[in-house]
Amino acid sequence: MDEKEILRIFAKEKAYLTGHFLLSSGLHSPNYMQCALVLQSAWLAEKFCKELSKKLKSHKIQCVIGPALGGMMVSHEMGRALKVRSLFAERVDGSFSLRRGFSLKKNERVLVVEDVITTGKSIYEVIDLIEASGAKVEAVACLVDRSDGAAVFAQEFHSLLKLRIKTYRPEDCPLCREKKVPLIKPGSRDFKALKK
Ligand SMILES: [Zn+2]
């Protein structure tokens, strides 16, 4: 499965849209990604994670952890692909922790996963959590790397798809200038109409 094929599946599942979108940041973009829409098809989540797991063959991973919520599904499916325990980290009073009796062993080799990495901030926090517990972060992996090279890790970093989504300030937006494609706010009524 190459990047083109993966992006084609994302587009087919309406997890990757092309148009004219108003983002929550106030910026405009010709594309919008909602990874949950592809992960809702559990068999696609399984397929993608199986593919991603091939890139991690050289590592002897013993456990997978993803930050909730986005990283949970990927952690689950990576755990299935690698046949290791799948954990998730949750935010408690603003910082990530392991709850529900989850624990790591000293020197356990851990893979940190996420659905989409943009800044890498959550991942850095989960890495700190793992290292503080005495376990070892072996690698980082995600389905979509949207960081455009900004997310840098001390460990090996693998992704299935590298995607740079352009954003514009409203006053600089070429789509606004062309006036051909209406501006849509993802999640709004218009957005739902667009998905039909
Ligand atoms: Zn615009």
Image (cartoon, rainbow, N blue to C red):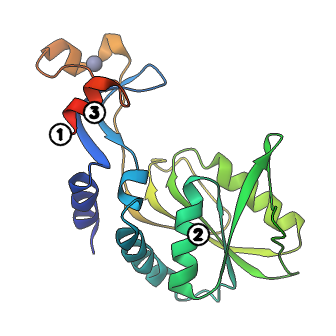
> Is residue 196 shown above or below 142?
above
How many other residues sit within 10 Å of disc 1, few (<14), some (14-19) or many (≥20)? few
Residue that mark 1 sits on? 196
Circle 1 sits in a helix, a strand or a loop, which is it? loop
Query: Regarding ligand 1, which quadrant of the image does it lie in?
Result: top left
> Amino acid type of disc 3?
Lys
User: Which residue is tagged 2?
Assistant: 75
Query: Position of 99 compared to 10: left or right?
Result: right
Tag 3 residue: 192
Q: Which of 118 and 44 is in front in this view?
A: 44
Mark 2 closeness class: few <14, some 14–19, many ≥20 residues within 10 Å: many
Query: Residue, x 81% and y 62% (percent of image)?
Result: 98
Q: Which of marks 2 and 1 is nearer the N terminus?
A: 2
Q: How many labels does the image show?
A: 3
If you read the primary sequence from the N terminus, does the residue marked by circle 3 or circle 2 appear first?
A: 2
The residue depicted at 26 percent of the width and 24 percent of the height is: 190
Q: Position of residue 148 (x, y in %)?
A: 45, 47
Nearest to the observer: residue 79 or residue 114: 79
Give the x, y percent position of residue 52.
Answer: 44, 75
- What residue lies at 33% left-to-right and 10% top-to-bottom? 171
Helix, strand or loop at label 3? It is helix
